[in-house]
Amino acid sequence: MSRQIELKTDAQLAIMHKAGLILHQGLDAVVTAAQPGVTTAHLDQVFRSVLADNGATSNFLGYHGFPATICASVNDEVVHGIPGQRVLQDGDIISIDAGAVVDGWHSDSARTVIVGTPDPADTRLSAITQEAMWAGIAAFARAKHVGEIGNAIEDYVRAQPGEPLGILEDYVGHGIGSAMHQAPDVFNYRSGMRGPRVKAGMVLAIEPMLVRGDIATKTLADDWTVVTVDGSNASQWEHSVARHKEGIWVITAPDGGAANLARYGVTPVPIPQN
């Protein structure tokens, strides 16, 4: 990974937003399709169809040999689950991570879905993970340094009552632009480092991953699927977020994140049109 941080022009950010909106549409379709009795391979086909219908391509398919357009990580699978013949069962919790590319510019987003009848503990896990993401995005709106995002995420998670959740440290967020994974790393916890200075043109994929148990993970024999060692369930939520001259805009959300950022006193600003 190049350690140079790529700063985008407003015109480039606008293309990334187009890719982000297609990705949002694709994830909507996958979430709707995630029902008991459906295979994870079917979810991948649903997403592929949305990309094809909108003239976008996948940044996951073929990435270091990855064989699908989405990662479908079920229950104790944290990230990088490969879609296949696994049949979703009532009560499964599944994280769907995907990306779209338009004219060479990338987007990346993830959601957690609970299939059928939810376990209340999984509902809580997903809700806290999702809100931790928004806490991090809100911090990015005001941050002087990237490390403030991880501080906000950990502070939110640790402040929640009830059973403590683990914040994965082996997998972090990242910069995104003309490639899917770029500098800087975006930690989901207090790293003790300020990180790079936040500048206009920066786009970050903010993606906390939380588990109901210990944060230790291992990679399965397929060299992709990451699972918790203790078998505890996991959740991942992610948005790609642009910081431009006038504010921030969540490029993978149709409203730029307005509805969810309002409770943090943050008003996203659309990407300026040249």
Image (spheres, grey):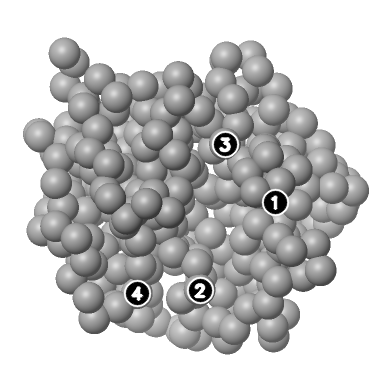
Please rate how many residues cluster around mark 4, counting C-alpha atoms within 10 Å: few if below 14, some from 14 to 19, many from 20: many
Whichever of callouts 2 and 4 sits on the residue coming sooner in the sequence is 2
Residue 98 on image: x %, y %: 58, 42
User: Mark 3 against mark 1, which lies toward the viewer?
Assistant: 3
Disc number placed over residue 170 in the picture, else none: 2
What amino acid is at disc 4?
Tyr
Q: Is mark 1 on a helix, strand or loop?
A: strand
Q: Is mark 2 on a helix, strand or loop?
A: loop
Give the residue number, with chain letter if any, for mark 4.
Answer: 189
Residue 195 on image: x %, y %: 21, 66
Give the residue number, with chain letter if any, for mark 1.
Answer: 72
Q: What element carries label 3?
A: loop
What amino acid is at disc 3?
Asn
Compute the Cα span from label 3 to label 1: 15 Å
Compute the Cα span from label 1 to label 4: 24 Å
Q: Are marks 2 and 4 in contact (CB under 8 Å)?
A: no
What amino acid is at disc 2?
Asp
Q: Is mark 4 on a helix, strand or loop?
A: loop
Give the residue number, with chain letter if any, for mark 3.
Answer: 59
